[in-house]
């Protein structure tokens, strides 16, 4: 018995160790939502304290390349003093309060960390903070991402009263930040920070990275994780988290936030949302609703979309060759059929044409909905004075549909006013990102771009530019290195002025041989997983869920023809 028990014990022990290692590896590869307020706060006043904590910061950012960043400074006698405090918080809960005003010299690793563009620094007005750090302390900050850009994409989920950090934290995290004037404008250069100052400073940077993490989880699960019942939404896989981070930050890194509601251009001419915002007095002076007096020439009507000037569908009936109803169309379309001898007019009131040949398109839409001569208004808010055609399935996907599906289907086209159209387009961007993740089809930028940057060519151009503009101030050994770069590229024994001019005209972007359009890859994926009809239905249902239209045409259906 003893001889048999030993190998069994060894096997069981091995299984136990394997399960522990498996659990540890799985936990290590999971990104978890950190409860608000959990974490450790460290105050750094010298280089030695920074060097002791930097390895931990480095370890955290190797796993999740995102930190919350904020700055505090003193405003005194109408002037702002240099940045006194930098707050850095990781997703795992480490918060470093770096007191720059107390440090005699700035560590090189701090400079390297802040300038590393691969580590995102998230916050509100974080790019402005980076600019002040550069001016005050010569610190270059790269990888800044303003949370206001991201939150604007989730308006249908998180309703923000204002786009300050306090308002965003309240909407996304349900967290009330303490923004008392006495603390916010306190002495950040004091010999010792008070407990209230430490708590205030830590909360700002911690909430910033928590907001970003929550938005990533929202993209992964398609909704607010706190509202999803019956599912584990406390963690996601690291590779999924990193992929969504890349998609969310695409095109927004190191961009200064521009408030879309800002009503003045740089030339101080008011931008008027519509002509209704301008009142004309008896003496001909134009006055905006903000009370600003403007001349007629200075009034710029801002219109992001051009609404239609005539109804979309008229009361023209189209009959098949056998006399059965097909659909309604406008007068231009009816004239087009008649002029090309594809049909003939058989009735004037209402205008009715009969086709000689049945169109080679999908007839699933030839139902009751097509025959409706409905009112022309926004299906969301009911506005009737202007509207835009809204294609529920984006054109970048429709153009890769099978031939029989490419024809415009009435259930995929609705009318929206300009305001609702813009909101719907913002929602479309979210679903587009989800499809990029689901179908492994990167958006058409970065690694998935049609053209990519050739870094060898860029190196040649930089060498030519340096020699052209600053050759006299560059050390001789460096000049030789730059000239050698050009000679190796052009295979010539020496560098001439003509060669430099030619090098400066090189294009650094070349065609990506592995490029596949995002829309094409998504459609091919959908064909193999449910079909194009189910894909169309998904877009229609998404429009219903996000926009909640109240004025849909009669007989309009989400799953029409599927």
Image (spheres, helix red, strand yellow):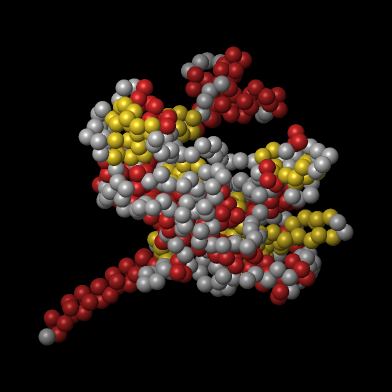
> Does 260 appear above or below 179?
above
Residue at x 46% of width, y 39% of height: 312
Residue farthest along the bottom direction in this orientation: 1
On screen, 25 above or below 194? above
Note whether residue 66 is visible: no
Give percent across and percent down for residue 387: 52, 43
Q: Residue at x 73, y 70 (%)?
A: 180
531 sits to left or right of 58: left
Compared across the picture, whether 434 is left or right of 344 comes to: right
Where is residue 295 drawn, in percent x and y? 79, 37
User: Does residue 475 appear in the picture of this structure?
Assistant: yes
Q: Observer-nearest residue: 124 or 329? A: 329
Nearer to me, 242 or 181: 181
Q: For the point 49% across and 22% down, which residue is it?
A: 489
Q: Position of residue 519 (x, y in %)?
A: 38, 41
Residue drawn at the location 58% of the way across and 22% of the way down: 504
Q: Quadrant of the N terminus?
A: bottom left
């Amino acid at each position: 018995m003893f001889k048999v028990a030993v190998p069994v014990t060894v096997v069981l022990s091995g299984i136990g160790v394997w399960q522990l290692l498996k659990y540890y590896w799985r936990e290590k590869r999971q990104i978890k939502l950190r409860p608000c307020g959990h974490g450790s706060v460290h105050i750094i006043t010298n280089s030695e304290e920074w060097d002791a904590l930097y390895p931990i910061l480095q370890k955290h950012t190797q796993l999740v390349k995102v930190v919350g960043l904020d700055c505090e400074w003193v405003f005194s006698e109408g002037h702002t003093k240099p940045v006194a405090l930098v707050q850095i918080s990781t997703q795992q809960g480490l918060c470093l309060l770096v007191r720059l005003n107390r440090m005699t010299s700035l560590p090189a690793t701090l400079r390297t960390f802040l300038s590393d563009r691969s580590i995102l620094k998230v916050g509100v007005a974080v790019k402005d903070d980076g600019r002040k750090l550069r001016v005050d302390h010569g610190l270059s900050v790269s990888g800044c991402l303003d949370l206001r850009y991201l939150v604007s994409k989730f308006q249908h989920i998180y309703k923000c009263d204002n786009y300050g950090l306090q308002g965003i934290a309240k909407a996304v995290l349900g967290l009330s930040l303490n923004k008392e004037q006495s603390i916010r404008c306190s002495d950040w250069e004091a010999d010792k920070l008070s407990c209230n100052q430490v708590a205030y400073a830590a909360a700002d940077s911690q909430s910033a990275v928590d907001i970003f993490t929550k938005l990533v989880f929202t993209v992964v699960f398609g909704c607010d994780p706190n509202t999803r019942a019956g599912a584990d939404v406390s963690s996601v896989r690291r590779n999924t988290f990193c992929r969504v981070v890349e998609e969310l930050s695409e095109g927004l890194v190191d961009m200064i936030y521009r408030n879309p509601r800002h009503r003045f251009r740089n030339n101080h001419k008011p931008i008027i949302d519509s002509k209704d915002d301008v009142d004309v007095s008896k003496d001909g002076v134009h006055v905006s609703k903000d009370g600003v007096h403007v001349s007629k020439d200075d009034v710029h009507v801002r219109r992001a979309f051009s609404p239609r000037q005539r109804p979309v569908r008229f009361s023209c009936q189209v009959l098949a060759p056998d006399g059965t109803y097909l659909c309604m169309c406008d007068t231009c379309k009816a004239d087009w059929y008649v002029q090309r001898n594809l049909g003939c007019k058989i009735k004037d009131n209402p205008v009715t044409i009969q086709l000689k040949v049945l169109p080679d398109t999908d007839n699933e839409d030839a139902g009751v909905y097509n025959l409706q001569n409905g009112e022309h208004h926004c299906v969301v808010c009911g506005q009737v004075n202007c509207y835009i055609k809204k294609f529920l399935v984006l054109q970048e996907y429709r153009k890769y549909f099978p031939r029989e599906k490419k024809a415009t289907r009435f259930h995929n086209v609705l009318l929206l006013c300009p305001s609702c159209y813009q909101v719907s387009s913002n929602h479309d961007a979210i679903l587009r990102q989800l499809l990029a993740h689901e179908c492994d089809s990167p958006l058409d930028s970065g690694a998935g771009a049609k053209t990519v940057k050739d870094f060898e060519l860029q190196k040649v151009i930089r060498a030519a530019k340096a020699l052209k503009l600053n050759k006299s101030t560059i050390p001789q050994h460096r000049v030789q290195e730059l000239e050698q770069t050009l000679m190796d590229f052009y295979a010539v024994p020496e560098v001439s002025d003509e060669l430099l001019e030619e090098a400066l005209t090189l294009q650094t972007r070349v065609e990506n041989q592995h490029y596949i359009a995002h829309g094409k890859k998504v459609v091919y994926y959908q064909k193999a997983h449910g079909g194009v009809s189910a894909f169309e239905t998904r877009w229609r249902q998404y429009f219903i869920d996000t926009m909640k239209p109240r004025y849909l045409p009669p007989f309009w259906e989400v799953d029409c023809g599927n």
